[in-house]
Image: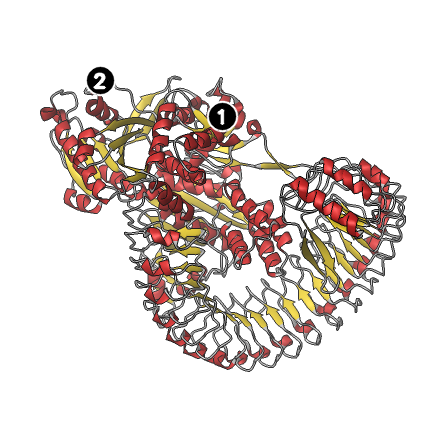
């Protein structure tokens, strides 16, 4: 049924039945349809709805509950208020729903509806309320998430009882001062600073003004009827005006500057207090609040719980992240049902042993080893004691009602105590020492198991657990999946980092939605796994030696649809092709380009200029294709500039399987530097690196690809081999070493015959392992795109989609083909940027991008500065439109050449983010930073001063390491404190200096500490970021020091006899073992690896979002997270929002949202 027919049917049915209510949600309406004229005949109508979904407050449970239209047509998206609505209307809802705001601006037609009592126009673009000024019967108004600044039209509506104007532009509340009938006023997320107009609204019972600019609460002191008050996220430090609000039952004041709770001591009606994220130290004023049921003082500075000891009505306590070590004051609170004391200093649970009503405990990240006090708490349903020091579970066997256990990150090896806990539904014992799952075999209600990071090899005990829906056994020793094949309710499996080779058992699990099998030994991927699991939407297979799939399909994160589309299109017709990449690297001026010219063009130029950045060539091998029975063998040749300034920028292109040709000559091998005279007459130099440096470089970035080593200028220098050649050859997959004299034309004399034979032999070997089957339609698209690139720089996403359709690609596969061509290097594309333009001609893009480093151009201007503006690129890109320049800068960011610094977005008065104009954006290019000390560095970090030092000594210290670190941590440093080889970081009072010493091949981190520290959060962030960067190669063991002179390793400290208080460092000196405690401090496990590039604001918003989720407030989750989701994740975030709006949730939706939020704090695995 089309939308017009549906609307007509609904209205005519209403006219026939004379029903007082009419639901026109989900009818595909825009508000202009002629069929809406029928509404004029509904003169009996009292209530009319146009919204698709909305939220209503349920006073019974004090929750906002989601409601949805009963219709099933397309979603409405109104652009205007429909006319012809009957004058009898009393209730009208024309509200969009975040994130899909409607476009209504003019509400003038509402002045013709004099009987209106309740209006919901939330999530529109309304700024003018004048049409409401004469609606004398109006009692309820919801205009949240609009653009209202002026409330004057409301001042003469004395009947108003409820106003919702959150997320607008309101500053002045004066027009409300005479609306004495108001009982509900929600004005959060505005710009309100003065509450004086509210001082006479004594009927108010609910007031929400969080996220404003309020510092003075004096105007509220006479509002004694208030029951609920929320003033979170303001500028408050004084609660005295609240001391007479005796009716208050709920008080929320999180994230202010409140330290003194004395004004609350007489508010005996209080049942709920939220004061998290304040500097509270003393709870004494709360000791007389006997009606308190829920208390949230998370993230304060509380150490003493004694004032709570007589609050016998308390049911829920959240004191997470405080310095608490004693729970004794809680021992006589018999009504406690929920305790959260995560991130404290607790080691003794004895005070909890007589709390019979406890249902939920979170004491994770403390120092607990003994669970005996819990064994009589028979009502316990949920326990989280993760990241403690527990080594046995015996006490849990007496807790028959347990449904959820999290004891991850402890020292547990025996699951036997769990074997009779038949109500268990969820178990997380990850990162322990478990090897036997037998005790779980008789737990029929188990739905979720996480036993990752243990020592498990046999899954047989799980084979009869028919209720299992989720299994995580990542990082164990599992090889056989057959015990899972009868678990038909399984929806999610994570068995990454095991020893799995056969996926056949998974084909029998039709409800699978998520499979993670990365880092295994899978060589064959069965097509039936995709066809037999139609609900599969998350599949991770990277880091497997799969031979039947192109690596670009499965080696790039989630790949379920990509594989599905690959097989679908392959079955429509295929070609057999092989596409090889040959990458030339080595020092500048050694003859890489000359080698390519001699090979491909049969010519040699003694004055060949040095390669600038990257040169691209292409060739075909028809004879090899015929020999291998392929349709085509194609080779892409990438000739890389060898100067240091280009090294870090090569990564985007080098992180791929290829054949690497390492070119060297005897002179540069033994000359530390090359010199060049710049146009201004100054002399610049760049380093020559030894052969083993380049071998490590290709080994690290090239995913252990085969290497050919070619010595040039052999006619002058003779055939040479570097020292330790046999060891180098074995370690770095070197196929052969060739000596070449490129000035000679005869292949028998110049070495090119030997080079081509070795290269083509290597390519033949690669073909044996490669997937050569490609859908014919994909191949035709590739050929067409390559032809177009000869005459066009870019292509719109829409034009590309049309091209795919014309070549026979199924519409569902277009994104997959696009992604495939991007990752195979055919073109460059980033989702959602710059009108979805695709860069066809990468040579054009590369040449434009590397203009920044042109030694005769812009490089001269910014050499030694490091920072530049978007507008400055016009110096080198004259004639290119701004849109094109912006596209090229995004290309640079993808190459990790630069990063945008400063504010990416500006926020308008309506709280909506707008992208900072390109010309105003500031960028940092680490290669261009001055190589000098930081000002006052020696004063801040004097030699041999006490502190915390970490030293990494590497075989080769690539420039990319410190440059990547700078790109990821710049936000923790002042611009003046960022130099080419060092960066000074500051976080929450801690200072840290990170320095690279290329000559010594060392990276040293120093954290300034004027006092003894138990744990350094800044050092932990630095260590994690460096560990991630260094993990790309052969990561060395870090060495630790307290004075920068004597270093010890973690292995030394862990093996050191506990009875000996001193340890010998590598300088021969002895140090107190206790002085190294900060290095051994156990970081919190529950959040993912915090990357140093994550601002604290993001961490806070993620924490808030997860809290909202666990409180079943999904709207709150989306609202707080939206402002910190990065561009590259916004598409996925919007996908989740759309699913929420359309009620397409599924069993794991909340878990998926939590996983997404946590994922913002880590890099991709």
Name the image colouring. Answer: secondary structure
- Up the image or down, 387 lies above or below 914; here it is below
Task: Locate residue 672, reporting x and y percent.
Answer: 26, 32
Q: Secondary structure at mark 1?
A: helix
**Residue placed under numbered mark 1 in the picture:** 885
Residue situated in front as seen by the camera: 64 or 512: 512
Q: How dense is the environment of label 2, judged by Cα within 10 Å: few (below 14), some, or many (20 and up)?
A: few
Instruction: State which tag comes first along the sequence, 1 or 2.
Output: 2
The numbered dot on residue 766 is: none
- Up the image or down, 1083 lies above or below 215; here it is below
- Up the image or down, 800 lies above or below 24; here it is above
Front position among marks 1 and 2: 1
Q: Residue at x 39, y 43 (%)?
A: 565
Q: Residue at x 59, y 64 (%)?
A: 320
Q: Secondary structure at mark 2?
A: loop
Q: Quadrant of residue 653?
A: top left
On the question of residue 930 being in view, the answer is no
Task: Locate residue 611, reporting x and y percent.
Answer: 31, 24
**Residue placed under numbered mark 2 in the picture:** 605
- Up the image or down, 76 lies above or below 779; here it is below
Task: Locate residue 1084, reporting x and y percent.
Answer: 49, 60
Q: Is residue 186 left or right of residue 929?
A: right
Q: Is residue 876 left or right of residue 661?
A: right
Q: Is residue 280 left or right of residue 378?
A: right
Q: Is residue 718 left or right of residue 232?
A: left
Q: Residue at x 75, y 44 (%)?
A: 121
Which quarter of the rendered picture does the N terminus lie within?
A: top right
Q: What is the number of callouts on the image?
A: 2
Residue situated in front as seen by the camera: 739 or 1132: 1132
* Residue furthest out toward the front: 16
- Cα separation, mark 1 vs mark 2, equals 34 Å
């Amino acid at each position: 049924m089309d939308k017009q027919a549906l609307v007509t049917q609904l209205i005519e049915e209403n006219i026939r039945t004379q029903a007082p209510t009419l639901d026109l949600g989900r009818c595909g309406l825009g508000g202009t349809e002629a069929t809406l004229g029928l509404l004029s005949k509904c003169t009996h109508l009292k209530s009319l709805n146009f919204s698709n979904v909305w939220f209503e407050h349920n006073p019974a449970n004090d929750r906002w509950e989601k409601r949805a239209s009963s219709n099933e047509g397309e979603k409405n998206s109104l652009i205007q208020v429909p006319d012809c609505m009957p004058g009898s209307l009393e209730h009208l809802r024309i509200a969009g729903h975040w994130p899909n705001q409607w476009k209504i601006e003019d509400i003038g037609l509402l002045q013709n509806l004099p009987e209106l009592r309740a209006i919901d126009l939330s999530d529109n673009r309304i700024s003018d309320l004048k049409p409401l000024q004469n609606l004398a019967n109006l009692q309820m108004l919801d205009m949240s998430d609009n653009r209202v600044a002026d409330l004057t039209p409301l001042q003469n509506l004395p009947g108003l009882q409820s106003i919702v104007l959150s997320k607008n532009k309101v500053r002045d509340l004066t027009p409300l001062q005479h609306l004495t009938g108001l009982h509900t006023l929600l004005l959060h997320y505005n710009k309100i600073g003065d509450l004086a107009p509210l001082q006479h609204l004594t009927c108010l019972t609910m007031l929400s003004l969080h996220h404003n600019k309020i510092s003075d609460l004096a105007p509220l002191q006479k509002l004694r009827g208030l029951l609920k008050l929320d003033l979170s996220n303001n500028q408050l430090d004084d609660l005295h005006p609240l001391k007479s609000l005796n009716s208050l039952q709920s008080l929320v004041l999180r994230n202010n500057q409140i330290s003194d709770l004395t004004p609350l001591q007489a508010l005996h009606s209080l049942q709920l207090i939220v004061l998290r994220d304040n500097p509270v130290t003393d709870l004494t004023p709360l000791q007389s609040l006997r009606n308190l049921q829920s208390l949230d003082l998370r993230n304060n500075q509380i150490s003493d719980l004694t004032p709570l000891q007589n609050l016998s009505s308390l049911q829920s306590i959240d004191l997470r992240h405080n310095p608490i070590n004693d729970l004794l004051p809680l021992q006589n609170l018999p009504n406690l049902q929920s305790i959260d004391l995560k991130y404290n200093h607790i080691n003794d649970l004895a005070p909890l042993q007589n709390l019979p009503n406890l249902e939920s405990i979170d004491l994770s990240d403390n120092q607990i080893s003994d669970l005996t006090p819990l064994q009589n708490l028979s009502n316990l349903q949920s326990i989280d004691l993760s990241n403690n020091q527990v080594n046995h579970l015996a006490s849990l066997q007496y807790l028959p009602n347990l449904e959820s256990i999290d004891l991850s990150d402890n020292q547990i090896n025996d699951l036997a105590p769990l074997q009779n806990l038949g109500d268990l539904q969820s178990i997380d014992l990850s990162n322990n020492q478990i090897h036997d799952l037998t005790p779980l075999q008789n737990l029929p209600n188990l739905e979720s198991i996480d036993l990752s990071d243990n020592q498990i090899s046999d899954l047989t005990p799980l084979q009869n657990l028919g209720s299992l829906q989720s299994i995580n056994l990542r990082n164990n020793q599992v090889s056989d999946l057959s015990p899972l094949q009868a678990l038909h309710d399984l929806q999610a499996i994570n068995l990454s980092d095991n020893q799995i080779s056969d996926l056949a058992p998974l084909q029998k699990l039709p409800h699978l939605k998520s499979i993670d099998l990365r880092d295994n030994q899978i060589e064959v991927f069965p097509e039936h796994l995709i066809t037999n699991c139609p609900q599969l939407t998350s599949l991770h297979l990277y880091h497997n030696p799969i031979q039947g799939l192109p690596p670009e399909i499965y080696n790039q994160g989630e790949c379920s649809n990509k594989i599905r589309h690959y097989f679908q299109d392959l079955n429509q017709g295929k070609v057999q092709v092989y596409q090889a990449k040959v990458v030339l690297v080595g020092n500048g001026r050694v003859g890489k380009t000359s080698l390519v010219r001699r090979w491909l063009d049969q010519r040699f130029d003694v004055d060949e200029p040095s390669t600038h950045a990257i040169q691209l060539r292409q060739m075909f091998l028809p004879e090899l294709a015929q020999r291998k029975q392929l349709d085509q063998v194609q080779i892409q040749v990438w000739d890389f500039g060898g100067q240091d300034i280009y090294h870090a920028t090569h990564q985007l292109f080098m992180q791929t399987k290829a054949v690497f040709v390492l070119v060297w000559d005897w002179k540069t091998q033994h000359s530390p530097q090359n010199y060049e005279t710049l146009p201004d007459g100054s002399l610049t130099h760049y380093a020559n690196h030894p052969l083993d440096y380049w071998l490590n470089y290709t080994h690290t970035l090239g995913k252990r690809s085969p290497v050919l080593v070619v010595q040039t200028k052999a006619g002058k220098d003779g055939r040479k081999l570097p020292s330790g050649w046999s060891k180098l050859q074995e370690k770095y997959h070197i196929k052969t070493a060739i000596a070449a004299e490129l000035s000679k034309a005869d292949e028998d004399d110049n070495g090119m015959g030997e080079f081509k034979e070795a290269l083509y032999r290597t390519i033949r070997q690669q073909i044996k392992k490669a997937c050569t089957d490609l859908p014919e339609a994909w191949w035709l698209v590739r050929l067409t795109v390559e032809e177009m690139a000869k005459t066009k720089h870019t292509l719109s996403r829409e034009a590309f989609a049309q091209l795919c359709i014309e070549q026979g690609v199924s519409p569902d596969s277009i994104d997959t083909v696009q992604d495939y061509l991007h990752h195979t290097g055919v073109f460059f594309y980033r989702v959602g940027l710059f009108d979805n333009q695709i860069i066809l001609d990468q040579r054009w893009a590369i040449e434009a991008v590397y203009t920044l480093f042109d030694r005769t151009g812009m490089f001269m201007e910014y050499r030694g500065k490091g920072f530049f503006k978007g507008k400055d690129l016009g110096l080198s890109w004259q004639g290119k439109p701004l849109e094109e320049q912006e596209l090229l800068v995004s290309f640079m960011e993808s190459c990790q050449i630069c990063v945008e610094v400063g504010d990416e977005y500006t926020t308008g008065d309506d709280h909506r983010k707008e992208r900072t104009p390109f010309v105003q954006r500031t960028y940092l290019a680490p290669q261009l930073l001055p190589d000098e000390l930081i000002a006052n560095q020696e004063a801040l970090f004097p030699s041999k001063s006490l502190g915390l030092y970490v030293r990494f000594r590497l075989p080769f210290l690539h420039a990319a390491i410190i440059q990547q670190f700078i790109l990821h941590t710049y936000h923790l440093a002042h611009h003046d404190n960022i130099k080419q080889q060092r960066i000074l970081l500051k976080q929450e009072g801690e200072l840290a200096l990170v320095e690279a010493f290329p000559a010594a091949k060392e990276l040293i981190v120093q954290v300034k500490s004027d006092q003894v520290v138990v744990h350094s959060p800044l050092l932990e962030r630095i260590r994690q970021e460096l560990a991630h960067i260094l993990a790309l190669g052969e990561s060395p063991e870090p060495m630790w020091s307290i004075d920068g002179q004597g270093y010890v390793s973690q292995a030394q400290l862990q093996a050191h006899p506990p009875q000996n208080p001193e340890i010998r460092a590598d300088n021969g000196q002895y140090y107190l073992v206790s002085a190294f405690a900060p290095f051994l401090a156990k970081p919190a496990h529950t959040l993912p690896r915090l990357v140093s590039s994550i601002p604290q604001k993001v961490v806070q918003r993620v924490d808030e979002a997860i809290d909202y989720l666990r409180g079943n407030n999904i709207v709150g989750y989306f609202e707080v997270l939206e402002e910190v989701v990065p561009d590259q994740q916004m598409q996925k975030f919007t996908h989740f929002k759309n699913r929420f709006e359309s009620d397409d949730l599924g069993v794991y939706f909340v878990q998926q949202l939590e996983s997404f939020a946590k994922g913002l704090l880590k890099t991709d695995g």
